[in-house]
């Protein structure tokens, strides 16, 4: 971290305090088929709704910052606060990915309690997939299309989540890419340190990715935050 400044960190925060998506120039979105991503009219503190419809084809809805400005090689942290209209058939990932939301790429699946990394090659965060046998949140990471972290956090990690209640999920990636910490609602829920890197030295972006799984759901994102140490050179 740079010590020649009182602002040693780069931080980007989006609170969605606008009336239309078009007023969010540094935000990328992906809308699922048949529904629209939109700012919630009168939403408390500003909220962006990224809904999915009732099909079951893993169609993607997502929001992220608009550029891959978060290099895995700095200390990285991201967090999102969001609300769910339903917990039935939800599939959601909150974390860092290697593709901005508008690229229509997917992150992880947990079918039958087996974590697989999908079209994004490198990502890290918290994931829930209703196709898993055990209904739980997973701490996940992948490096160059290979899963490096796949820790189930137990049934309590999901069973206590109810609709219209705030959820705050976040992840920290160390500069050497060998350590990660995962957070839910202000508490560290898992930490891992490895002898080898857990994610490649690639450019990433914080975001929220949601997928259709048979039941329509609204995911209202209250804020999205990313933070990294300011460069010394």
Image: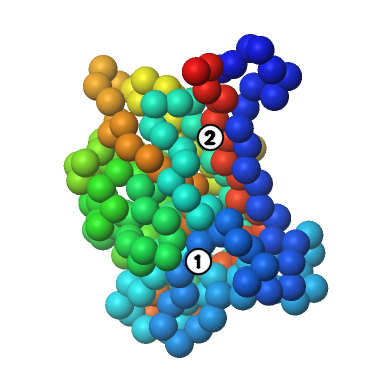
Q: Is residue 95 found left or right of 202 in the rendered image? A: right
Q: Quadrant of residue 23?
A: bottom right
Secondary structure of the residue carrying tag 1 is: strand
Residue topped by disc 1: 29
Above or below for 194 versus 152 = above
Q: Residue 18: percent from the left, percent from the top?
A: 74, 67
- The residue under label 2 is 77
Q: Is residue 138 visible?
A: no
Residue visible at 49% across and 32% down in the picture: 76
Circle count: 2
Secondary structure of the residue carrying tag 2 is: strand
Other-residue count near label 2 (Cα within 10 Å), few / some / many at <14 / 14–19 / ≥20: many
| Residue 145 position in % (x across, y down) | 20, 46
- The quarter of the picture where residue 74 lies is top left
In the rendered structure, the answer to whether residue 159 lies left or right of residue 23 reads left
Using a 10 Å C-alpha cutoff, classify the residue at mark 1 as few (fewer than 14 neighbours), some (14 to 19) or many (20 or more). many
The residue shown at (30%, 44%) is 122
* Foreground pick, 7 / 150: 7
Q: Nearer the viewer, residue 146 or 187?
A: 146
Which image quadrant is residue 78 in? top right
Is 43 placed above or below 7 here?
Answer: below
User: In what quadrant of the picture does the N terminus appear?
Assistant: top right
Camera-nearest residue between 147 and 137: 147
Residue 5 is labelled as none
Looking at the image, what colour scheme do you see? Answer: rainbow
Work out how far the residue at label 1 is from the one at label 2, CA to CA, in angstroms.
21 Å
Residue found farthest to the top: 3
Task: Residue 60: tell me if it is visible.
Answer: yes
């Amino acid at each position: 971290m740079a010590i020649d400044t009182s602002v040693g960190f780069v931080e980007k925060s989006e609170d969605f305090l606008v009336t239309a998506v078009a007023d969010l120039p540094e935000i990328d979105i992906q809308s699922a088929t048949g529904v629209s991503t939109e700012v919630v009219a009168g939403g408390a503190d500003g909220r962006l709704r990224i809904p999915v419809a009732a099909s079951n084809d893993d169609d993607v809805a997502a929001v992220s910052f608009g550029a891959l400005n978060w290099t895995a090689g700095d200390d990285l942290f991201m967090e999102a606060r969001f609300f769910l209209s339903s917990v039935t058939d939800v599939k959601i990932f909150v974390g860092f990915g290697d593709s901005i939301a508008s690229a229509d790429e997917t992150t992880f699946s947990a079918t039958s309690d087996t974590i697989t990394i999908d079209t994004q090659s490198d990502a890290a965060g918290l994931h829930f997939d209703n196709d898993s046998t055990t209904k739980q949140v997973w701490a996940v990471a992948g490096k160059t299309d290979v899963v490096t972290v796949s820790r189930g956090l137990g049934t309590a990690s999901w069973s206590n989540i109810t609709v219209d209640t705030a959820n705050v999920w976040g992840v920290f990636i160390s500069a050497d890419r060998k350590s990660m910490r995962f957070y839910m609602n202000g508490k560290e829920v898992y930490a891992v340190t490895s002898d080898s890197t857990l994610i490649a030295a690639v450019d990433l972006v914080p975001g929220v990715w949601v997928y259709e799984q048979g039941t329509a759901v609204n995911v209202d994102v209250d804020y999205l935050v990313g933070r990294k140490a300011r460069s010394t050179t």
